[in-house]
Amino acid sequence: MGLFDFIKKQFIDVIEWTESGDGTVAWRYPMADQEIQNGAVLTVRESQVAVFVNEGQIADVFGPGRHTLTTQTLPLLTNLKNWDKLFASPFKSDVVFFSTRQQLDQRWGTQQPVTVRDKDFGVVRFRAFGNYGWRVVDPRLLMKEVVGTRDTYTVADLDGQLRGFMLQHLSDAVAQSGVAFLDLAANQVEFAAQLKTATAPEFTRIGLGLETVTLQNVSLPEELQKILDQKIGMGMIGQNMGQFMQYQTAQAIPKFAENAGQGGGLAGDAMGLGAGMAMGQTMAQAMQQGLQPPAAAAAPVAAPVVTLKPDEIMATLEKLADLKAKGILTEDEFSAKKTELLKKLV
């Protein structure tokens, strides 16, 4: 290289990165045709790591601080370049900055119901969603496995894969927690801890650390939720049938009133309400009788014989004869009723 070409070259004496807040995880310092000046200053801020790459091979890694670039501060790069003494000329090397701060409020959730075994229901399909947070812990591994030669790599680029890790181990977390589905809502912290334990190795495998996992909601599909509601209702009936039917009747009264006000048939609603109340009372009595211990067998009691006075029988026969004359009763019906009445004659 001639003197004129050397003079035209641009030399870098300060290397630094100020994050823009756009979710960038890895950023390659733009070198173009520039070379790093011997004795240049590398500034690495808190929550950053700088990686030097020489001809595609990772050399030195610098943590937070102000570093003067010499053969003493670049031992691996010096070995790769075969510098046996202080280099006096500029050198060319790629510098990649990594953000090591926590990437918070990352969302995970089930697009389709997940099927798991449950000790109460046998098999349950449910949905769940929550948040998680992660950070870069091994920039060498992340660059080798994920970032590669890209100039920038963002949180959004990693989002789909990381959410896949979370959902992949969701069933494992439920099984390892040993918590029944009905108790998950009351043990969200424990379930989230199990999900973190099950998923963390996948993050470690690509140079990341899973810092936090939260569970915000867990729910059944609509059809299974209806079955669960019915089971809960049956549990209520088994404990106190009378109170349950009273509650159901009280809930139904406003609906009947509303239908009546809209011309929905007051008589029919009243009959339905009466039938419901009668059914509730009957079921309550049956349940209470079933819960009581059986009483000692008692001797059968004969049905009392009903008798009528002669004038009552005659008055009744006259009414029946009138009904027969009008064609309401047949001859056979009249004869049968007359015989029955005469048996009751005192």
Image: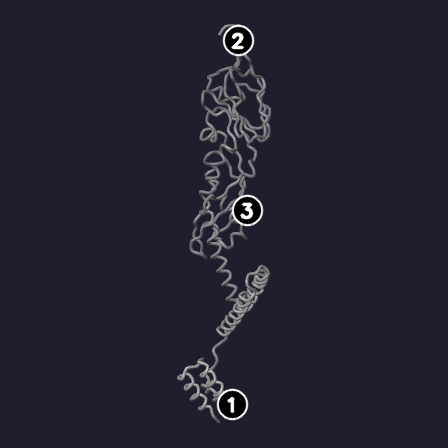
Find residue 72 and report its horizontal and vertical position in percent: 54, 20
The outermost residue toward the front is: 326
- The answer for how far apart the CA atoms under marks 1 and 2 are is 138 Å
- The answer for how far apart the CA atoms under marks 3 and 2 are is 61 Å
Q: Residues within 10 Å of mark 3 (few under 14, many from 20)?
A: some
Please give the name of the residue rendered at 52% of the width and 18% of the height, measured from the top-left corner.
31
Of marks 3 and 1, the one in the foreground: 1
Q: Secondary structure at mark 3?
A: strand
Between 47 and 155, the one lying in front of the other is 155
The answer to which of marks 1 and 2 sits earlier in the sequence is 2
Residue 312 position (above or below residue 212): below
Residue 343 position (above or below residue 33): below
The answer to which of marks 3 and 1 sits earlier in the sequence is 3
Q: Residues within 10 Å of mark 1 (few under 14, many from 20)?
A: few
Between 65 and 46, the one lying in front of the other is 46
Dot 1 amino acid type: Glu
Specify the label residue 94 is tagged with.
Answer: none
Dot 2 amino acid type: Phe
Q: Secondary structure at mark 2?
A: helix
Name the residue beneath numbered marker 1: 312
